[in-house]
Each structure stands twice: as structure tokens, then as C-alpha cells.
Amino acid sequence: MRTFHLRTDSQPESLSSARRQVRRALAGAGLSVEAARDIEVAVGEALSNTYRHAYARGVGPVSVDVLATPDTLTVVVADEGPATVPPAIPLDLPPRSDAGGHGLYVVGRLAGSVEVGIGPAGHGVTVWITAQLRAPGEPPRARPDLETVAADLQTSSAEPTGPSEAIADEAADKKPERPED
Amino acid sequence: MYERSSRGMAAGTPGSCAVRILAVHTDSRPESLGIARRQVRDAMTRAGLGDETARDMEVAVGEALSNIYQHAYPGGIGAVSVEVIATATAITVVVRDDGDATAAPEIPRRLPPRTSPGGRGLYMIGRLANDVELRVNPAGHGVTARITARLKTPLGTAWGGEGNGPARKTAPQ
């Protein structure tokens, strides 16, 4: 069931707004506070990618949907850029020399699952970011050590980034909300 | 990154472009494995895999996940990862547990009798997939299964080898 739909564009301010709207859409959806935070950051990375990669720093359409099932919550971020092959999801942090892939690496670590594909028009990247809803009382799952991930990222991504910095700042502002893991 | 990834893909697997299109980190509870199975099915379908092959692969992957539930973590819950890797000519689903097994199970050539403690799932996987590989993880314990369907119609045509693939039914609903 689609619980949220937004069609916007790839300008940084539009993407920041989109991210805030996703945060509100996720509130009360059955995710734990940490899980909702992780998904929001993952969505932020996917949105950043549309700015950085989809339209070669031009502006183009971006859509964001939230799909809910009884077991899962999926955020779908789609651009309509020229890509006809989906980007690979790195399992390891890409080397510093390779300027790409960090965002999807982070998405893969933060979200329970991430899928990439090409949109119905035959071009443009779609990213599905899914969190599993956990019934109350179930034990938390083993999670990646995000402190380490963040530290790795800081040492390996030297290049300045566009909207992701703004988005990351926003996340930093909110950090006190997040309980220590 | 989208442009760069194609370069990375070419470097990843000799002779073909391998794209990891799905990565799932989950656990061995039945409900989690059920979700993972559906995610694999959706990813394969969205990648353009035909219905029949997708069904066979889904059943094969379901058996692999069921084996993890039954055998990998006796009496407990443990980590499970599932990936879907697409090349122009094949789809491979990689299912991994971090259980205690230090040897990979054999794939039976004949259907094991009902009295046998296990192996029927692996027999099914062997029949449904084109290739199955079972290995102990590099860490020395836990098993990784690589289940592959070779494609009659290359995905590469859909994934714009030359940029004009057919439209696909991948709309986010």
C-alpha cells in the first residue's frame, strides 16, 4: 500500500524538503526510533545521488514513494536520468580513488535491504530501501558498527559534496534524539 | 556513480558486467526469511527475468533459506545475507549464513528418501537452478550458496547494452 507519494526535482533544497517529508511519513509507521533514523539517512543518500549523478548536476524530476506492507516499509527513490544500467551496490567501502559508490554503500549498511533497478521508461535509476518492521519484544538484529562506517567514510571521502553535506548537517542537528546503540 | 559503476562492474567479474542489484541483511527467523524471499523474487522480476525462471529460482532460494532456518543455527537466530547479482547472461542469488558448519553440504544427485534427515531441499535446488555452488565462508564457518539461472534472453538487451532496451514493468507502485 502506498502511504506517501512525492514528485519533486533534484535541486538540493527540494531534496532536503523531500527528506523531511519522508521523515514525517515514517513517523508512526511502526519502525523503532533508530530504524526510522537509519532509513532517513539512507534515503538522504539516495536523494543525494540523484543530485550528484542522475542529471550531471542539472535538474530533473525525482519521485519518492513510501510503500507499506504488514511486515515491511519500503522507500522508493526514482530519477529519470539517462542511466540504462543500475549502479552496483558495493558490499565494501569503495576505495578513496573511486569517487562513486559511497552513498549506496551507506544505504546498504543502514537499511535492512537495498535494491537498485532501472525505471519503467528503460532509463533512470530506482532505489528501493526496505526496513523490516519488528514486532514488539523481539530481539534487535545484529547491526553493522555504524561508528566504524562513519569513520571510514570520513577518512576516505575527501571530495566536498553538495546536498549531502546539508543533509548530513541536518542529521547531526538531530543526533541527540538517537539513543546510543 | 551511475556512470562510474559501469566501469566498476566491468572490473568486477571478468568477461561480464556484474551488478549487485539487491543486498539484504536479515536474520534466520521464518518471517524474516519470507520477506527476503519475496524481495529476491521482486528484484529478479524487476530485472527482467522471465516468469518461469523467476518462479524456479524463487523456489530454489526458498529452499536455501529454509535450510538456514532448519540447520544453520540450531536452537537460535542468526544473521543471514541475501544478494542478487545480475550479469548480461545470468542471475545469481547468493545466500549466506554465519552458522557453525565447517563443511559445505553435498548436493544429492537423487531425491533422498523421506527417512533421510535432510538433503531434499538441496536436491530441489539442484534441479531448479542451472548452477549451484556451496562453500564454507572464508571465515571458516557458515555456508554460502550461489544459485544461478542462466538466461536464454540476455538481460543485457534490456539493460541498455546499446541504450534502447524495452520498457520494463518496474514502476514503483
Image (spheres, coloured by chain):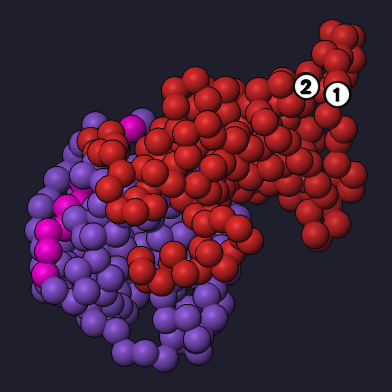
Chain colours: A purple, B red
Q: Chain of mark 1?
A: B
Q: Is residue A161 above or below residue B21?
A: below
Label 1, label 2: how far apart the Cα atoms are: 5 Å
Q: Residue at x 25, y 38 (%)?
A: B167
Q: Which mark is residue B151?
A: none
Residue B171 covered by magenta stretch: no
Position of residue B120 measured from the top left corner of the image (x, y, whole percent): 78, 18
Position of residue A77 measured from the top left corner of the image (x, y, whole percent): 26, 54
Q: Which mark is residue B123?
A: 2
Labels 1 & 2 near each other (Cβ < 8 A): yes
Q: Identify the magenta region.
A: A59-69
Mark 1: secondary structure: loop
Q: Is residue B39 visible?
A: no
**Sequence order check: which comes first, mark 1 or mark 2?**
1
Q: Residues within 10 Å of mark 2 (few under 14, many from 20)?
A: some
Q: Quadrant of the N terminus of chain A?
A: top left
Tell me the quarter of the picture where residue B126 sits.
Answer: top right
Mark 2: secondary structure: helix
Position of residue A76 measured from the top left corner of the image (x, y, whole percent): 28, 49
Q: Which amino acid type is shown beneath numbered disc 1?
A: Pro
Q: Which amino acid type is shown beneath numbered disc 2?
A: Tyr
Q: Residue at x 12, y 51 (%)?
A: A6
Tell me the quarter of the picture where residue A59 sits.
Answer: bottom left
Tell me the quarter of the picture where residue A95 sits.
Answer: bottom right
Instruction: Give left or right: position of B172 versus B139.
Output: left
Q: Is residue B14 visible?
A: yes
Q: Residue at x 44, y 42 (%)?
A: B155
Instruction: Give left or right: position of A69 versus B33.
Output: left
Q: To which residue does mark 1 refer?
A: B108
Q: Is residue B89 above or below residue A17?
A: above
Q: Residue furthest top?
A: B114
